[in-house]
Image (spheres, rainbow, N blue to C red):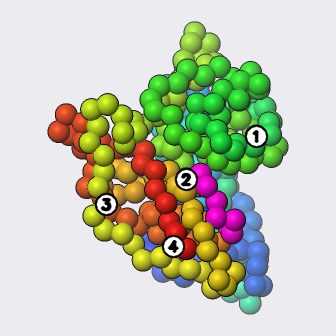
Amino acid sequence: MLSSLLLAAALATDPACADPVMAGVDGVSLPESLTKSKPVYPEEARLKRIGGNVIVNAIVCADGHVEDVAILSGVPWGEGLLEAEAQRTVKTWTYRPALKEGRPVAVYMTVAVDFNLEGRHGPGWVDAKINLNLQNTTLKQALHLLEEAGLYVTYEGSNPPVRGEYKGSTVRQILADLARRYSLEMELIGEDHDRLRVTALPAHDDDGVSPPVLVADAPLEVPSEAPQGKHGTVGLNLVVLPDGSVDAAAIILSCGTEELDWAAVRAAKKRTYRPATRNGAPIAVYLPASVEF
């Protein structure tokens, strides 16, 4: 979230959009909506019965117009059909600007753009709520646990370990989180588009795969708020891209301190590798890794 905010700030070039601040805190009022057009439902998404919420971050500028609309989370099985329309729609919205000490200021805003199919966000299982506590679980097992909510999954690819806890989360929220953490491709299939096909990446040690090789590690920055003298190992599952960068780092073994767990994630995502290859071509793979404190 913070990285998205920093990126938005860097991109803002309009003087009215400069130096955005958080709304609703430190004496900054909330912007008030003036015009809010509805998104145009992409026809391909309608035919494939793809629906849901696209969450975006944007800047509401000091003159009330919207800039720098960035996707925070989309519909994991949406094939990217809804995100562009969500961005276009939010950029057309106008606001009475936020105020600080009586003066208009640019502020960050996070909103959901709803794509609704006949009162639903897609198949019936999408909005079902479920509790999941994933410990010593694989990704494939985690997805099949969602079948309690009526979801039917077909799964392809390797099967990395998964750790996480979801309380009262919708199936869509859980799938979106897993898709982000494990770079999953998701597609609704079947005559009624109510089944989900999930494709995972290959593992570093799959047949025919030459694994990534670490080229440059990143310095480990221990946050000041972390307990002093704490030691331990954080286990991670990395997604190493074909260019050797790390796209995602999912925690699979905690060292018992949340601050150190996330410091490990930040350090691991700054690593660079010589990428994995298959038949001589670079590919993205899962790679287990650890960070010691």
Q: Can you identify the residue that label 3 sits on?
A: 214
- Mark 4 or mark 3: which is in front? 3
Q: Is residue 55 visible?
A: yes
Q: Which mark is residue 250?
A: 2
Give the class, few, some or many, for how many residues have Cα within 10 Å of label 2's Cα (few <14, many ≥20).
many
| Residue most extreme to the top | 191
Rounded to the nearest whole Å, what is the CA distance between mark 4 and mark 3?
28 Å
Asked whether residue 130 is drawn in magenta, I would say: no
Rendered location of residue 116, percent (x, y): 69, 32
- Which residue type does callout 4 highlight? Leu
Q: Can you identify the residue that label 1 sits on?
A: 132
Q: Can you identify the residue that label 4 sits on?
A: 6
Q: Secondary structure at mark 1?
A: strand
Q: Is residue 80 above or below residue 224?
A: above
Q: Is residue 110 above or below residue 123?
A: below
- Mark 4 or mark 1: which is in front? 1
Asked if disc 1 and disc 3 are in contact, CB closer than 8 Å, the reply is no
Q: Earlier in the sequence, mark 4 or mark 1?
A: 4
Rounded to the nearest whole Å, what is the CA distance between mark 1 and mark 3?
34 Å
- Which residue type does callout 1 highlight? Leu
Q: Earlier in the sequence, mark 1 or mark 3?
A: 1
Rounded to the nearest whole Å, what is the CA distance between mark 2 and mark 1?
17 Å
Q: Secondary structure at mark 4?
A: helix
- The magenta stretch is 252-258
Instruction: Report whether 46 appears left or right of 200.
Output: right
- Which residue type does callout 3 highlight? Leu
Question: What is the count of numbered marks?
Answer: 4
Rendered location of residue 236, percent (x, y): 52, 55
Q: Secondary structure at mark 2?
A: strand
Q: Is residue 144 above or below residue 93?
A: above
